[in-house]
């Protein structure tokens, strides 16, 4: 574990202790459940966003990918109510993958900057979402219990439930961490992110790296879309995944993945998601008035980033000494 | 064949329309009393009624059109729905023009903007067409339509919701409100009414412990609902007068099992109610997570529009503001000083009736 992750972990722990001192409800099993349930969707999407940010890119369309996947799978459930859970996830992942490949193709081959491309597809995919369902909601009666049960059952320890959704998301995290350490692909991603021209000279195809990263981001977004149905039990074309892009990008940034590219870790991303989950649930359970919540939320993110920056300073000094 | 017969019908209607076309003098100021005869007793030539929703895709307006359509035999009219593809401020203008050309008798309109249709609606009025708005009125430009039909008196929603909440929790115990945003004016009015009504001795044993805001986002609403369950161990009720909040709360409550009759019900469980469409919550009502909830009936707006429009046309009722008219159910409906009339009270949906509704 590096300084950056240690710093972030310290922030999460200090925050949890402070919240518990303020209000014992914070460590109530219900509340811990609530924090743990906050994470899977975010973490899944953030795992895909991570390599995209590493290569100095960004996928702003992720909120709409989640929405389109959730709605499309919901529409499919209308005509095929018996589809099994693995099949639903496979379909969602495939939809996300196709959308991600589209993003990747526009960025790689049409050479449109990632920010502009994915702002465009953010709207485009949302538009497709409305089209797919004809403006209708996916009502709760369409979402089978075998899917929603994944959000409230899992491994229970002392009244606290680690849901199947979170276990699934953490597994994806572990796989990514292993790949980041050992795979050729992630090696290329980091090399390309730290210095694209040098990577090119070393024989790394920038096109392949970019396409793969955006496709991966789409894929995890598609999975997160099915998780959305599982967690919330219904989906509306307007609100499903809407605004999620900001959370995903924030969690990756807080997790210490450098926006300027080339560095970051899966553990950092997990901690970034955990921090956002803790803050968002703490605002509720500590009874912060609704009108102040946004401000407190923004401030906490800034403080987390500041502590991250400071811990990086410590590391540099340590290296110099 | 279908086209041919409708063409024939159209021809007949154009002829019929000619007979009555010139008689609609909207400038006459005689406030006609409707008398005692029920509108259903009316005969006379078949009228033409058109419904123009905000756009053709909006599912909310489907039952409105259905309400008009189902009344066509009773009030003897031919019905058409003609909506624009998009809900733009000006997209309804060409459609209204077409309908004036077609010499319709009644236009029922869910206006996309309160101020862009004045001119074309004045044209319609000059041709003797009765223009009624449903759901979306011409606020500030009321003189350009005959009457505006709103689904329910929004001032009464808070009271009605509190009464339902009270009934479910036996008028006793702690309850909380899960609202939309702090800036949603309808929500704030209802919450203010609820707080005011709580002073009534009837509700003296009910205590509003918290009002939280889910911002009409599924994620925030779920977290707020989970927060309520954590913060208030003695909570007996949650009232969510917004459909996103209520759907999210229902899923959270189902997961927790702490609803009346649920697997983990504490002290009888938590009663959840609010506002939503029946389709969205049917699953939770079937499972017993939610006992009952409310909404206005978009369909009743359509039925009232059909009744009001055709009887105004036939009896030449001047729909002057303040006029009382007979409704489809025989009750009197009074237009207020802005020409607004309410289609009815909130409907309560529960196990006994939820299967009857499809919106």
Image: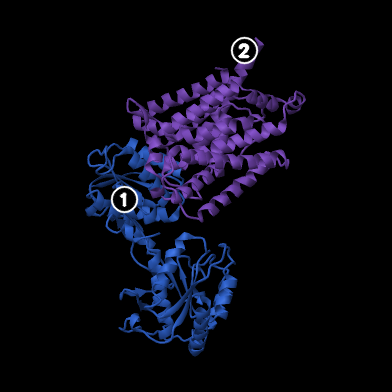
Instruction: Give the residue displayed 50% in from the left and 24% down from the top.
Output: A11
Q: Which mark is residue A318?
A: 2
Among the chains, which one is purple? A
* Residue A278 at least partly seen: no
Q: Quick check: B249 left or right of B259?
A: right
As drawn, B7 above or below A242: below
Instruction: Give the residue displayed 36% in from the left and 33% down from the top.
Output: A153
As drawn, B321 above or below A209: below
Residue B350 on image: x %, y %? 29, 55
Between B82 and A293, the residue placed more toward the observer is B82
The secondary element bearing badge 2 is classed as: helix
- Where does the N terminus of chain A fall, quadrant-wise? top right
Instruction: Give the residue displayed 40% in from the left and 85% down from the top.
Output: B315
Between A224 and B33, the residue placed more toward the observer is A224
Among the chains, which one is blue? B
Q: Residues within 10 Å of mark 2 (few under 14, many from 20)?
A: few
Residue A127 on image: x %, y %? 58, 52
Q: Which mark is residue B285?
A: 1
């Amino acid at each position: 574990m590096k300084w950056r992750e240690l710093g972030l972990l310290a922030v999460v722990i200090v925050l949890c202790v402070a919240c518990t001192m303020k209000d014992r409800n914070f460590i109530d099993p219900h509340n811990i459940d609530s924090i743990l349930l906050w994470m899977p969707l975010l973490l899944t999407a953030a795992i895909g966003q991570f390599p995209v940010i590493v290569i100095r890119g960004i996928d702003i369309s992720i909120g709409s990918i989640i929405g389109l996947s959730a709605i499309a799978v919901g529409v499919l459930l209308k005509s095929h109510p018996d589809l099994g859970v693995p099949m639903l996830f496979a379909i969602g992942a495939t939809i996300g993958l196709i959308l991600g490949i589209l993003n990747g193709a526009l960025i790689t081959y049409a050479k449109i900057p990632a920010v502009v491309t994915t702002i465009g597809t953010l709207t485009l995919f949302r538009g497709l979402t409305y089209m797919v369902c004809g403006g209708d909601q996916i009502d709760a009666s369409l979402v089978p219990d075998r899917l929603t049960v994944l959000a409230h059952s899992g491994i229970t320890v002392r009244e606290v439930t680690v849901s199947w959704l979170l276990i699934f998301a953490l597994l994806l995290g572990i796989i990514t961490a292993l790949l980041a350490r050992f795979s050729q692909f992630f090696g290329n991603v980091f090399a390309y992110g730290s210095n694209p021209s040098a990577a090119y000279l070393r024989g790394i195809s920038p096109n392949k790296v970019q396409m793969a990263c955006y496709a991966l981001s789409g894929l995890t977004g598609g999975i997160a879309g099915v998780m959305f149905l599982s967690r919330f039990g219904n989906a509306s074309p307007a609100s499903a995944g809407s605004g999620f892009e900001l959370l995903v990008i924030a969690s990756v940034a807080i997790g210490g993945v450098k926006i300027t590219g080339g560095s970051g870790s899966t553990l950092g991303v997990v901690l970034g998601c955990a921090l956002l989950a803790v803050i968002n649930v703490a605002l509720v359970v500590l009874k912060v008035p609704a009108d102040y919540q946004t401000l407190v939320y923004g401030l906490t993110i800034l403080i987390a980033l500041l502590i991250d920056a400071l811990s990086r300073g410590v590391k540099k000094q340590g290296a110099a000494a | 064949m279908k086209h041919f017969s409708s063409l024939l019908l159209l021809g007949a209607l154009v002829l019929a329309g000619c007979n009555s076309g010139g008689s609609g003098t909207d400038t006459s100021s005689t406030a006609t009393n409707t008398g005692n005869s029920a509108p259903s007793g009316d005969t006379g030539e078949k009228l033409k009624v058109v419904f123009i929703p905000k756009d053709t895709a909006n599912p909310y307006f489907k039952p409105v059109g259905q309400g008009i359509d189902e009344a066509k035999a009773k009030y003897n009219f031919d019905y058409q729905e003609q909506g624009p593809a998009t809900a733009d401020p000006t997209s309804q203008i060409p459609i209204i023009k077409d309908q004036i050309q077609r010499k319709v008798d009644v236009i029922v309109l869910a206006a996309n903007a309160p101020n862009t249709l004045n001119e074309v609606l004045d044209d319609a009025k000059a041709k003797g067409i009765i223009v009624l708005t449903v759901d979306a009125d011409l606020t500030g430009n009321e003189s350009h339509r005959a009457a505006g039909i709103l689904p329910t008196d929004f001032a009464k929603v808070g009271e009605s919701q509190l009464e339902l909440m009270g009934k479910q929790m036996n008028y006793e115990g702690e309850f909380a409100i899960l609202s939309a945003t702090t800036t949603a004016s309808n929500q704030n009015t209802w919450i203010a009414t609820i707080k005011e009504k709580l002073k009534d001795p009837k509700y003296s044993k009910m205590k509003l412990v918290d009002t939280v805001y889910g911002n009409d986002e599924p994620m925030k609403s779920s977290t707020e609902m989970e927060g309520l369950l954590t913060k208030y161990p003695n909570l007996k009720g949650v009232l969510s007068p917004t459909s996103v909040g209520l759907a999210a709360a229902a899923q959270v409550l189902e997961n927790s099992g702490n609803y009346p009759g649920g697997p983990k019900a504490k002290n009888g469980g938590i009663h959840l109610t609010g506002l939503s469409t029946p389709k969205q919550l049917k699953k939770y009502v079937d499972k017993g997570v939610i006992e009952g909830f409310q909404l206005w009936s978009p369909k009743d707006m359509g039925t009232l529009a059909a009744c009001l429009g055709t009887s105004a046309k036939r009896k030449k009722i001047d729909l002057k503001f303040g006029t009382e008219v007979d409704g489809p159910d025989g009750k009197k409906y009074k237009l207020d000083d802005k020409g607004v009339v309410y289609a009815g009270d909130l409907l309560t949906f529960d196990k006994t009736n939820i299967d009857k509704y499809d919106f």
